[in-house]
Amino acid sequence: MSSIKLDNLTKKYGEIDVIKGVNIEIKSGEFVVIVGPSGCGKSTMLRMIAGLEKITNGNVLIDGKVVNDIEPAKRDVAMVFQSYALYPHLSVFENIAFGLKIAKLNKDLIKTKVSQVASALELSDQLNKLPKQLSGGQRQRVAIARAMVREPKVFLFDEPLSNLDAGLRVNTRIELAKLHQSISATMVYVTHDQVEALTLAEKIVVLNEGVVEQYGTPMELYFKPVNKFIAGFIGSPKMNFIDAKVVEVNKKGCKLNILDKVIDSYFSFQNVKCDQGLSLGIRPENLTVVSQRDCLFNGSVEIIEYLGEYNLIYIRIPQQELLCIKVDIKLSFNVSDDVCLGAQSENIHVFNEDGLSIYE
Amino acid sequence: MFSQVLQSILVVFLAVTISIGYFVAANWILKLWGEKSNSSLPEKFKPWVFLFPALFLVSLYLIYPIIETVRLSFYNNSGRSFVGLDNYIWLLGDDEVKVAVRNNFMWLFIVPTISTGIGLVAAVLADRVWWGTFAKTLIFMPMAISFVGASVIWKFVYDLRPIDVDQIGLLNAILVKLGSEPMAWITIPFWNNFFLMIILIWIQTVFAMVILSAALRGLSSEVIEASRMDGASEFQIFYKIMIPQILSTIMVVWTTITIIVLKVFDIVVTMTNGQWDTGVLANLMFNWMFVGGDFGRGSLIALIIMIGVIPIMFWNIKRLRQEELI
Ligand SMILES: Nc1ncnc2c1ncn2[C@@H]1O[C@H](COP(=O)(O)OP(=O)(O)OP(=O)(O)O)[C@@H](O)[C@H]1O
Ligand SMILES: [Mg+2]
């Protein structure tokens, strides 16, 4: 168990800024997930923590100690690679034992440790096989076993589940969550799958083009996204955005013009100016079909997706992107039906022209 | 000149025409036969019809000479009268043959090992320094030089001039600069073999480096990083992670060079012509067969070389098969 601190961490490849001054503190024993679109620098950041990538500027601190110039092995961190990176010429046992042998541990001790880890990950029957004789899921577990056996203070995972099929991914995800509960080591986990992020993380770092957009708990990110990028990135299907304009501000709140229609009721937020353009964000599960009285705007049904548990309906509204709403399967719709849409005002996220959130 | 070019074009044209003609005609006849007899026999016959030209040529140029060589080894120098085991008895007692066999073994062991070893180290190191590509290009040069050409170059390195004139040989020039006497390098018994081997090592190291460099590039960088995370030092990464993964390529390089060494001939001819105990079997064979005109002994030495090659070939093919299985 140990804490990690990234202090103004910067990485340049030649002239290209890949990580642009990241400041993050990870508490001891925390499970932190780094998410972000492809190419945003997640792997680079993880590799800098591991010590595999040189740091251009700033510091990586582990347990309060700057480790910039400390070799990977001496940082007491273990990494699980996306490609598993098993030693192809060594048996599963040798793969797991490699680091211990390098550290010149006593033979019997190595055996006990390896067999303990192997039985915890259900690999006991595979110890004599070569990596190529294993299935993808088994290889994944060997990679995790190899990291676990060294009992590091910090685990780093770089998209460890991305090569697995959907079913196995869910299983391994649960295994990882259990693992974290049982060994309570600090874990940093990179993924671009937000379901993984939301389910595994105690805290999520959302990275975009080398900048941390938001760092917080899954709940915070979901319910209080600091900007439009986070709002659109977290949650599936994506949040809907609708343009609006402030027409009146007074003690009761403000009145908005949404799609050329002034809404009668007041919205509770006040730190806006008259005539200011806004973007309203409403998640598909919060946007509902309502009666004419509560109508914020209307449109026509364009596509219906049946997903079993619920249906997704895409609605065409003039001059806007298609809106997506999640509806109960009992409600039936037909293509080109006209519908009125509305939402509870506490479920409406408001963003200013710069894409930053406005809260009451 | 012009007529020669014309002639070769004609030959190429004829060869292609005959090949195509054979194919078309064979197909046509087989088809006719198939339609008439209505049996599956023509189908079974087909592969053999198409294999025949290749089998025929291989037997003509490979099998027949082997049989003829074996026969000649029991005959006298003119190849006319049968002498029984006389040539074999001579072979066992001859000092020159013994030296040649010893030299061959030394070449076989030293050249492939050192070439592969240096090539491997060069391949690893060249990938880590910024001037690696430049270094590789430089090392690559000898590959473009023939064995004879390389020997001529090295003749200048070992060159010896009378003591009162300037030494143009590199080694002797250095010796003289350092204040010693110049030496006749290629006549120093036993060690002169190594001076000859250096030439082939110089050439083959390049080959080894190029192939091994490609193999190293194929290794996953994540695997190497994983071993670094596991605490392996650079040296441990080299011999515990990299070498085992490219072991099969190393063996390919090693055996390829071994086979080249078995054929070594031109370097010895150019440098010493087998004098001062530097002869190898190929060299000895050439001298007996074509200089001495003794077909019996020449053939016998040829046979010995062939027998020497067989185990290596056999092992090579077996290993290749195994690789295909994996
Ligand atoms: N060795 C390198 N030289 C130059 N640029 C690099 C190098 N490695 C990575 N980059 C660049 O750095 C950026 C971040 O790469 P990184 O691998 O960290 O992305 P990522 O967030 O892990 O993406 P993904 O989700 O696709 O794995 C990319 O734009 C990439 O092109
Ligand atoms: Mg990545």
Image (tube, coloured by chain):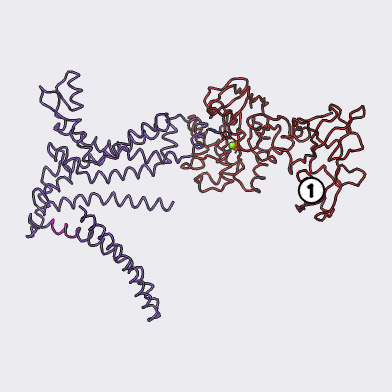
Chain colours: A red, B purple
> Measured from the top left, where is residue B122 in percent x and y?
36, 33
Identity, as a three-letter code, of the amino acid under mark 1:
Arg
Q: Determine which quarter of the picture holds residue A236.
A: top right
How many circles with numbers are drawn on the protein? 1
Chain letter of disc 1 in the image? A
> Measured from the top left, where is residue A5 in percent x and y?
64, 24
Q: Between residue B317 and residue B160, name the one nearer to us.
A: B160
Which residue occupies the extreme bottom position in the image?
B36
What quarter of the picture does the C terminus of chain A occupy? top right
Q: Residue at x 55, y 35 (%)?
A: A113
Which residue occupies the extreme top position in the image?
B179
Which residue has dot 1 on it? A316
Q: Is residue B260 above or below residue B186?
A: below
**Ligand 2 location (quadrant):** top right
> Measured from the top left, where is residue B311 in percent x and y?
27, 50
Task: Give the crowd class for mark 1: few <14, some 14-19, many >=20 residues within 10 Å.
Answer: many
Residue B129 falls inside the magenta stretch: no
Residue B267 shown left or right of residue A216 in the figure: left
What quarter of the picture does the N terminus of chain A occupy? top right
Which region shows up in magenta?
A: B66-72
Q: Residue at x 29, y 51 (%)?
A: B313
Q: Residue at x 40, y 50 (%)?
A: B323
